[in-house]
């Protein structure tokens, strides 16, 4: 088959969809010698061996131009190049394709539907208007967890026979690091908890701030909280709580951090504090494990699929429960902490992009072509 991948997230995002698209492309090209791949990009980037790249610029300042690209220009290019299938990693589209072109749609979560109040209005509207039709036209739906699959089946029962449930992997660069260069640059020379993710309501950071306050009042030691991630939508409540926090001086916001820097932060952290209300998968948990970093995360959604028996779980709606898990993990004796780190590394080894690509290819063959 000739398969086109809408690789726009490589160019226009820095979050989870960017990581997914980048590693999906790398893994498929490394594993697949049968199919031909074309990458649709917004910007010209480094040549990726094994794939042809077609640059179709996108003007994100003008909604009309962006829609023209999405609904007409990209479909025309796919038709012109006689692709057999098109894979959309960001689960929006493709649109206006000839019937002969198979559609592969990756669904990461259903948060715009399940937590619509946490999303901007236009995001809610677009999902409500288009998602059902996208799923109906899809020949194959890639779901990244059993929990996401169950959500799909509950809200769109017709998707059941088209779903392939495949857990994500972690990028090989995430591994234990001895270097502390980024910590030196940030001026962090004390123990710290780490939080990773876009600053937006679903990540539950307001409750994390309160849990951290309880933790500090109980532990009474200078343990920092580092929050890694870009400012997202509807984040006003977080920043208000942050400015009023009694330990504000010990809370650091780093903004975006490269994978190399993030691996260092995971490697030296007391642990990852990840009380997100809902995750379709939860890549930060897996990245932390790959660096030998213990994890305290929510007991909800897909996170137990990733964390298994290694992560420590808390009720995401109970600040005291989150705090008690943080306190207990911080007070672990040395040997217990060493064993927990080793368990994290073993857990991470079960999730690889090589496995993801192999399962994808099996799903492609079942889809036919």
Image (cartoon, grey):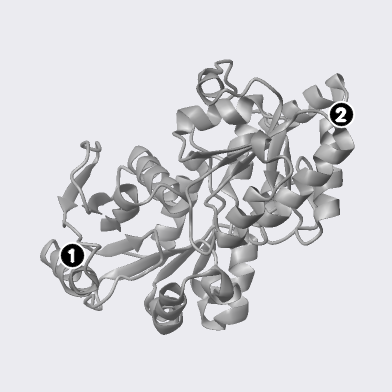
Q: How crowded is the residue under tag 1: few (<14 C-alpha within 10 Å), some, or many (20+)? A: many
Q: Position of residue 44 (x, y in %)?
A: 18, 44
Q: Position of residue 226 (x, y in %)?
A: 62, 37
| Mark number, residue 358 | none
| 1 vs 2, front mark | 2
- Residue beneath label 1, please? 78
Q: Quadrant of residue 194?
A: top right
Mark closest to the chain's N terminus, 1 or 2: 1
Residue furthest top in the image:
178
Question: Is 291 left, or right, of 340 in this rendering?
Answer: left
Q: Quadrant of the N terminus?
A: bottom left
| Mark number, residue 332 | 2
Question: Is 271 left, or right, of 254 in this rendering?
Answer: right
Q: Position of residue 167 (x, y in %)?
A: 57, 51
Residue at (54, 29) in percent of width and height: 263
SS for callout 2: loop
Nearest the viewer among 351 and 247 is 247
Image height check: is 193 above or below 130?
above
Nearest the viewer among 141 and 148 is 148
Per the model, the C-alpha gap separating discs 1 and 2 is 56 Å
Q: Position of residue 143 (x, y in %)?
A: 52, 62
Question: Is 323 left, or right, of 198 in this rendering?
Answer: right
Residue at (59, 65) in percent of width and height: 148
Question: Is 124 left, or right, of 314 in this rendering?
Answer: left
Residue at (55, 48) in percent of width and height: 197
Q: Quadrant of the C terminus?
A: bottom left
SS for callout 1: helix
Image height check: is 200 above or below 75?
above
Q: Can residue 236 be seen by looking at this rendering?
A: yes
Q: Quadrant of residue 191?
A: top right
């Amino acid at each position: 088959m000739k398969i086109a991948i809408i690789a726009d997230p490589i160019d226009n995002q820095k979050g989870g969809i960017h990581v997914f698209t980048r590693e999906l492309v790398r893994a498929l090209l490394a594993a697949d010698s049968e199919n031909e791949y074309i990458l649709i990009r917004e910007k010209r980037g480094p040549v990726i061996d094994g794939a042809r790249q077609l640059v179709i610029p996108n003007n994100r300042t003008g909604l009309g131009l962006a829609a023209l690209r999405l609904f007409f220009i990209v479909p025309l290019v796919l038709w012109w190049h006689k692709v057999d299938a098109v894979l959309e990693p960001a689960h929006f589209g493709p649109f206006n394709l000839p019937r002969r072109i198979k559609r592969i749609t990756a669904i990461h979560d259903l948060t715009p539907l399940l937590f619509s109040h946490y999303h901007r209005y236009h995001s809610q509207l677009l999902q409500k208007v288009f998602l059902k039709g996208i799923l109906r036209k899809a020949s194959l739906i890639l779901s990244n967890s059993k929990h996401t699959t169950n959500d799909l089946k509950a809200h769109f029962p017709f998707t059941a026979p088209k779903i392939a449930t495949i857990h994500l992997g972690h990028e090989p660069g995430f591994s234990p690091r001895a270097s502390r260069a980024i910590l030196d640059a940030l001026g962090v020379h004390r123990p710290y908890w780490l939080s990773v993710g876009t600053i937006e309501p679903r990540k539950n950071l307001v409750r994390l701030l309160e849990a951290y306050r309880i933790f500090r009042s109980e532990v009474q030691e200078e343990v920092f909280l580092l929050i890694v991630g870009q400012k997202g939508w509807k984040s006003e409540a977080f920043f208000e709580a942050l400015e009023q926090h009694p330990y504000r001086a010990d809370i650091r916001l780093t903004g975006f951090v490269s994978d190399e820097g993030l691996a260092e932060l995971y490697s030296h952290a007391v642990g990852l504090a990840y009380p997100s209300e809902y995750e379709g998968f939860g890549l930060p948990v897996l990245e932390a494990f790959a660096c030998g970093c213990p994890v305290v995360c929510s007991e909800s959604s897909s996170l137990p699929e990733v964390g298994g028996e290694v992560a420590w779980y808390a009720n995401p709606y109970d600040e005291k429960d989150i705090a008690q898990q943080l306190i207990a993990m911080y007070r672990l004796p040395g040997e217990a902490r060493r064993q927990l780190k080793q368990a994290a590394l073993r857990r991470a080894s079960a999730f690889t992009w090589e496995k993801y690509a192999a399962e994808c290819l099996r799903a492609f063959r079942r889809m036919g072509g």
